Image: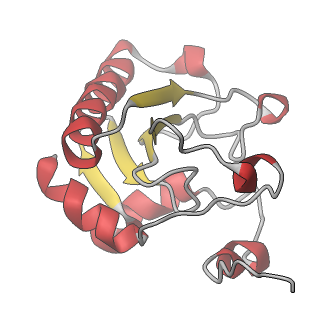
Amino acid sequence: MTEYLWSPWRIEYIKGPHDDSVCIFCEKPAAGDDETSRILARNDGAFVMLNTYPYNPGHLMVAPFRHTGDYESLSPEELLDANRLIQASLRVLRQGEGPHGLNLGMNLARTAGAGIRDHLHWHIVPQWNGDTNYMSIVGETRVLPELLAETYARLKPLF
């Protein structure tokens, strides 16, 4: 008997526009609705948001407000603002999610894995002992035990 794992939330991404001229890191903060956009925190130069298609619960992204794909073009102030939010995100994830470890990284250019190559962003992914299973390795599928709205509601007050 064949078993199925349903992930209906993925259809939004699959059928959605994949237009490189649309930048979520510009559109979401400009929309002015942080809860709908899943923006958890902002400062003068950067913001933190939940990844809509996370690798694990609590997968965050930190991005500068300015649209640039060139890391070297960031001003010292933009770097400081982004790093302040990265540091706050690490603290919040440890407190709100209790991971055993965290991955922090940035993909620069499409070849390096950047899904949105023209707007820099850091990924912060909580990890737990034993959280990698056959679904991620063989099935190229993520099994997430929690809805994004629940993760947002738990992490938002911690910022």
Color theme of the render? secondary structure
Which quadrant of the structure image shows residue 82?
top left
Residue at position x 86%, y 83% in the image: 2
At horizontal 21% and vertical 61% (from top left) the residue drawn is: 154
Q: Is residue 140 left or right of residue 102?
A: right
Residue at the image position 60 percent from the left and 63 percent from the top:
143
* Residue 38 seen in this snapshot: yes
Residue 81 place in picture, x, y as percent: 29, 27
Is 11 above or below relative to 118? below
Seen from the viewer's position, the closer of residues 120 and 151 is 151
Q: Which of 137 and 62 is in front in this view?
A: 137
Q: Would you say 26 lies left or right of 133 here?
A: left
The quarter in which the N terminus is drawn is: bottom right
Which of the pair 130/89 is nearer the observer? 130
Determine the image quadrant of residue 99.
Answer: top left
Q: Which residue lies furthest to the left in this view?
A: 157
**Residue 15, x across and y down, in percent:** 77, 80
Q: Position of residue 57 (x, y in %)?
A: 44, 55
Residue 48 placement (x, y as % from top left):
35, 45
Q: Nearer the viewer, residue 86 or 126?
A: 126
Q: Is residue 65 left or right of residue 130?
A: left
Tell me what residue is drawn at x 29 percent, y 47 percent: 97
